[in-house]
Image (spheres, rainbow, N blue to C red):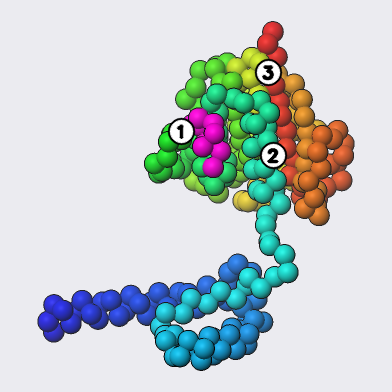
Amino acid sequence: MTGREHEGNRKGQTALLTLARHWLLAFLSPRPFVGFLYFPRFVKHYRKFKRLSRGTLAFRDTYPCMGDWMKYTPFDPHYFYQAAWLARMFAAFKPERNIDIGSSVMTIGVLSAVVNTIFVDYRPLLTNLSNLCSISADIVFMPFRTNSIESLSCLHVIEHIGLGRYGEQVDPEGSFKAARELERILKPGGKLYLSVPVGRERVCFNAHRVFRPQTVSELFPALCPIEFCFVDDRGAFVEDQPLSAAAECEYGCGLFIFEKPST
């Protein structure tokens, strides 16, 4: 076999594996097995498009997406609303720099366009964007001086700490240690923007913890809570509420602003 033939066979095998992967994922993502329900519609559309395009469609290039036929645009309420909430807080308080600990990289990538951001995560983020610097660190051993950070965000993170999900050490006290560290590095007068699951208190090993709203406040005894919003079990965003308003949630998303007293 010549080198050209070998290269041709390799490319053919790669194309076949790619095609198989696309078809497998069509029945598993974004909603498992929904693809089977919509497969007849896919076939109907494929045939119609091929007829109208005068046969220029090749099966080897198909990339079936069969889980997107919905009446409304789907979204994850926790992640959508917490990103929108944080952006509005930045617009209101206008921090010169924000240190983010492990939040959604999509959120932080966008917000770094308007706020100079240092992103800290156990797993380093390899990016190249202006206003965005990434460092690798453990949230329970932060590389910042005590009382040094004026603006600090940590969205949907501390509920995971100590469960081993992301490669960190298993530790039942992980969330509490993370809270102590966030509290330590926050500067007097500085603000902490935090989100965690709220509702019936429990550990859903090894995915996350769920906290009572009052427990979250108790995690930060040296800080003053200045605002609480939440996403309820129906996915609705509720602004500026007392902690008790989310007490009956099963799996809501609590959005907290804490401030460290200046004296």
Percent position (x, y) of residue 19? 42, 78
Percent position (x, y) of residue 246? 84, 41
Mark 3 Cα shell of 10 Å, populated few (<14), some (14-19), many (≥20): many
Spatial CA distance of label 1 from label 2 is: 20 Å
> Which residue occupies 46% across, 35% down?
132
**Range covered by the magenta-colored residues:** 110-118
**Residue 61 sits inside the magenta stretch:** no
225 relative to 255, above or below: above
The residue where tag 2 is placed is 85
Q: Name the one closer to the observer, 85 or 25.
A: 85
Instruction: Please give left or right for residue 113 compared with residue 252 in the image.
Output: left
**Residue 117 sits inside the magenta stretch:** yes
Instruction: Please give left or right for residue 255 compared with residue 190 in the image.
Output: right
Q: Name the one closer to the observer, 36 or 83.
A: 83
Spatial CA distance of label 3 from label 2 is: 20 Å
Q: Secondary structure at mark 3?
A: loop
The quarter of the image holding the C terminus is top right
Q: Secondary structure at mark 1?
A: loop
The residue where tag 3 is placed is 260
**Res. 115 in view:** yes
Task: Check disc 2 and give the amino acid type.
Answer: Trp
94 relative to 64, above or below: above
Q: Name the one closer to the observer, 146 or 46.
A: 46
Q: Quadrant of residue 201?
A: top right
**Res. 102 in view:** no
The residue where tag 1 is placed is 131
Task: Check disc 3 and give the amino acid type.
Answer: Lys
Query: Upstream in the sequence, badge 1 or badge 2?
Result: 2
Mark 1 Cα shell of 10 Å, populated few (<14), some (14-19), many (≥20): some
